[in-house]
């Protein structure tokens, strides 16, 4: 994000920005960003798989414990669009190092939390790291590889998301049951430390190239197709996290699955998301409207299947897997839509998407928590199904045309 300045400063900024494209890719640095993303997503997903034990140990309701997700999301929504502005004078590699340190600190605080307040503080710290890292990772990748290799670099970085999606929830549930939920957060802290070590060894110096401001965010937000895309993001993410945050209590109480089976179902969810990511990319290249509409529709159908036939362990497992496949396909289509809607301000559009996504996570977690505490776990799944169905309808009726 840049703001035009006058005179010699403007010329200096342009001179520094244009020649910066690399002739040789810094693949080690790209892999370090993938490791950072893996650590962040792992930490973000842990509460969903540890919720029951965590709530019992801290002496709070599952709905209250679920607000650990809310805290991360709210802070992440603020950090995403503002991180480039707050750190505009700092070398970008230093910023990434600081964000990785915050990831480690947040997991350690969670591991030693003695109250819900301390846990929420840990998740606030994670929100700063998460929002900042996500908002800057694409811009970092642009400076680490030649433009022709940018898609490959982004695919490597997003592999961290796919692997974390597959492993975080099931491993977290298993470790939490065997050694306790605190051990799961300690392991997440070790993962963050490994990512930081690789970043220290591989990230080159990347001085800031321009002065950031809020102007481009406002300009991009004025575009009609951007606003429609962000509405879809809001509906999909709020529905997703209203339901998924409470998937373990649902599986424990409705199909009455043992912990070993729940871990396998969560693993199937992650594997479904892994393949859904590739399926979403395949579909987005051919029909973008279908890509952004079919994915939330599949989530809605999965939620309906859980509500109607969820007492069957087999049906519940299949529905959760399909849910993971659908959600795995969501980011690819939405990111492609936003970039095509604002090709001249792709970074600002991406920042708005991250902020909206985090707001939606907070909304979903709050609504889901209230529903769980007052109407039972099934009501959170009902909200998730309705919200994602509305997202699918908006995408099909108002989504991108073939030319966009």
Image: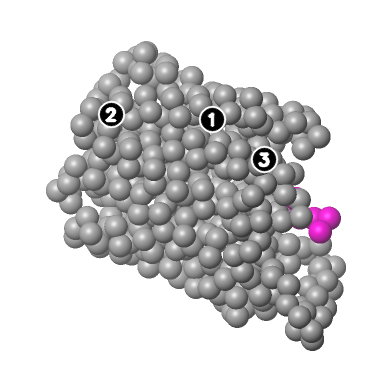
Return the residue at label 3. 225
Question: Residue at coordinates 42% horizontally, 18% vertically from top-left?
Answer: 304
The reply to whether the C-beta atoms of the residues labelled 3 and 1 are less than 8 Å apart is no
Return the residue at label 2. 377
Quarter-of-image position of residue 325 = top right
Q: Earlier in the sequence, mark 2 or mark 1?
A: 2
Viewer-nearest of labels 3 and 1?
3
Where's residue 263, x and y in %? Answer: 37, 34
Does the magenta run of residues contain 75? no
Return the residue at label 1. 391
At label 3, counting other C-alpha atoms closer than 10 Å, the crowd grade (few under 14, some 14-19, many 20 or more) is many
**Considering the image in quadrants, where does the C terminus appear?**
top right
Question: Residue at coordinates 76% horizontally, 34% vertically from top-left?
Answer: 285
Kind of element beneath mark 2: helix
Q: Is residue 256 depicted above or below 332 in this figure?
A: above
Residue 148 makes an appearance in the image: yes
Q: Magenta span covers which residues?
A: 147-152
Residue 296 makes an appearance in the image: no
**Considering the image in quadrants, where does the N terminus appear?**
bottom right
Q: Earlier in the sequence, mark 3 or mark 1?
A: 3
In the foreground, 228 or 205? 228
Q: Is residue 48 left or right of residue 353?
A: left
């Amino acid at each position: 994000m840049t703001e035009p300045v006058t005179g010699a400063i403007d010329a200096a900024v342009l001179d520094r920005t244009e020649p910066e494209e690399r002739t040789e890719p810094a693949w080690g640095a790209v892999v370090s960003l993938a490791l950072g993303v893996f650590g962040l997503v792992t930490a973000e997903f842990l509460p969903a798989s540890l919720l029951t034990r965590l709530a019992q140990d801290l002496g709070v309701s599952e709905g209250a414990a679920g607000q650990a997700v809310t805290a991360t999301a709210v802070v992440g929504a603020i950090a995403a669009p503002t991180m480039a502005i707050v750190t505009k004078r700092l070398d970008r590699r230093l910023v990434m190092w600081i964000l990785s340190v915050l990831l480690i600190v947040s997991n350690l605080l969670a591991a030693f939390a003695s109250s819900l307040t301390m846990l929420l503080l840990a998740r606030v710290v994670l929100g700063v790291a998460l929002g900042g890292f996500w908002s800057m990772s694409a811009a970092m990748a642009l400076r680490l590889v030649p433009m022709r290799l940018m898609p490959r670099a982004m695919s490597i970085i997003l592999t961290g998301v796919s692997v974390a999606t597959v492993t975080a929830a099931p491993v977290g549930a298993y470790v939490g049951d065997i050694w306790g939920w605190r051990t799961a957060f300690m392991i997440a802290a070790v993962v963050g430390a490994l990512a930081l070590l690789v970043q220290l060894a591989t990230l080159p110096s990347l001085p800031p190239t321009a002065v950031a401001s809020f102007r481009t965010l406002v300009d991009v937000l004025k575009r009609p197709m951007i606003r429609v895309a962000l509405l879809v993001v809001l509906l999909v993410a709020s529905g997703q996290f209203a339901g998924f945050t409470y998937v373990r209590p649902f599986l424990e109480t409705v199909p009455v699955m043992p912990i070993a089976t729940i871990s396998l179902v969560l693993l199937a969810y992650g594997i479904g998301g892994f393949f859904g990511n590739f399926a979403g990319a395949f579909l987005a290249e051919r029909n973008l409207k279908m890509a952004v509409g079919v994915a939330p529709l599949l989530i809605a159908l999965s939620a309906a299947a859980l509500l109607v036939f969820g007492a069957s362990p087999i049906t519940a497992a299949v529905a959760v897997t399909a849910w993971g496949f659908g959600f795995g396909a969501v980011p690819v289509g939405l990111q492609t839509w936003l970039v095509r809607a604002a090709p001249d301000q792709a970074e600002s559009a991406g920042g708005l998407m991250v902020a909206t996504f985090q707001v939606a996570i907070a909304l979903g977690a709050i609504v889901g928590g209230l529903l769980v505490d007052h109407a039972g776990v099934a009501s959170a799944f009902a909200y998730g199904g309705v919200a994602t169905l509305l997202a699918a309808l908006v995408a099909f009726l108002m989504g991108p045309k073939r030319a966009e």
